[in-house]
Amino acid sequence: MQCEEFESRLNDLLDERCPLFADGALADTALADHAAVCSACASIARGYETLSEGVSSWERVEVSADLTSRVITQWELAKAQSLASATDWDSAELPALRPVGVQRVVPAVAASGGRWATSRELALAGALLATAAALLVISGVGRTQHANDATTVATAPAVGVGPGFVAVDTAQESSTKTLAAAPVAVPVGRPVPQFTLTTLPIVEQMTESYRPLLEETDRTVRKSLGLPLTSDSQMITSAAAMGLVTQPDPEDSESSWDSLMPDQVVPVTNSAVRSVVALLRVLPGVEPVNQ
Amino acid sequence: MPAEHHAEHDDRAERIRAIVARCLAGETAAATELVDTFRQQVFGLAYRMLGHREDAEDVTQETFVRALRSLRSWDESRDFIPWLLAIAGNRCRTFLASKSRRPRFASECDQLPDPAPSPAAIRTLAEEVELALRGIRVEYRQAFVLFHEQELSYSEIAQALGCPVGTVKTWVHRARRELIERLRARDVVGEHSSAVRRI
């Protein structure tokens, strides 16, 4: 055997899943004979032996027990979104909402007077609508009404602004959701893809222009839900209001991206999702998904 | 492949097709069964690719959600596992690419310890190989793990990676060579090895 054949033969044996060594020596006679007289090839064989030993001693790392439930929860959310987008909104029976507390949501966005709104106006409108949505969801899941809760639905974002949200996802990779420093305005009246309460890792939403809006929404929802206000790694907010209008990943062959699918998010509850989608119907000036 | 292995393979393929059909009908129990069946395999790949448990779990979760959403695009005449691992591999590569360009906050880094051992703290040969694995090209790493740890055939790996079998073989061979060079650079080869010294 020549030296140039030695490593090739080692690879062939490994490709065939044959043991390289037996009883402490190279199992293949030709390899063993050559290694006995060639220190360079013997050294190569030692490398392969070390590598094989290392791989065979890898310990199995168990995945968390709750992974399946997390996947299924997210899948259920996707199904709910898909169902919502396919709903005939004119004939659909919508869950009863008992709006409370939304008087705190003041439509601070003035009428723009044109077909386009500025990105900040749209962002603010989104945040306000998110807050309103959160509060309505809370009422929808049967929470006790506080004494100071209002009983009327606040005005929707001003006419001319509408539910146009901000497409700012400049990343091709959906899981990163890097937000652009300067949000981009979108046409007024653009349908809201979905309006979903979610939690998102704070670190992935650190665009300075958006952070105050996100934090405000997070605080409002936490306060209303009675959750601790101390921040953890997750922020409760609304995907649409944050401008998470994802763009197709051209390299992503397995996903059609036919609907908004917040990745790495955890839905608050499926009933919350349904209630928020229903919000699109009850707030004046807000258009459902499929119109 | 022996006849009994063919039969076993066919039975398994038929079982997977049945589960997928139920998933497509929206049956949650079927989706649960599908995830339970393959989650360890997907996680195993992600863990070796990323070297970080939490990241691997995130990618595993994302892989299954995407797979469940894309089940209609799976060609029933082909093996399911390479299709699933292709999604997992894509997610891993995308994760690594995005991680490399994502700004990290110092406070975040301080709060999230990386469970992967530092080079100085490595004590076992298995850890040395894991460290070496993190240093080689992603496609070499994926091909190596799929062959040596997941024990997929070259044909299955080629399906998962979307490239010819010959390319996969080249990647696996180069992975072995580079890993050995890295182990040698850390004076690992010979230290742990015993067999060849007795030749």
Image (cartoon, coloured by chain):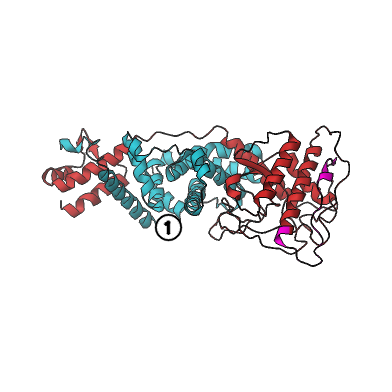
Find disc 1 in the rendering and name its residue: B163
**Disc 1 element:** loop
**Frontmost residue, A272 versus A236:** A236
Number of numbered discs overlaid on the protein picture: 1
Residue drawn 78% across the image and 67% down it = A115
Crowd band around label 1 with a 10 angstrom C-alpha radius: few (<14), some (14–19), many (20+): few
Residue interval drawn in magenta? A96-120
Q: Position of residue B19 (x, y in %)?
A: 59, 41
B22, above or below A252, in the image: above
Which chain's colour is red? Answer: A
Residue drawn 68% across the image and 36% down it = A229
Q: What is the drawing colour of chain B?
A: cyan
Q: Name the chief secondary structure element in magenta.
A: loop
Q: Position of residue B40 (x, y in %)?
A: 49, 37
Q: Residue furthest left?
A: A37
Identify the amino acid type marked 1.
Answer: Cys
Q: Is residue B11 visible?
A: no
Position of residue A74 in the picture relative to residue A156 (left or right): left
Position of residue B26 in the picture relative to residue B172 (left or right): right
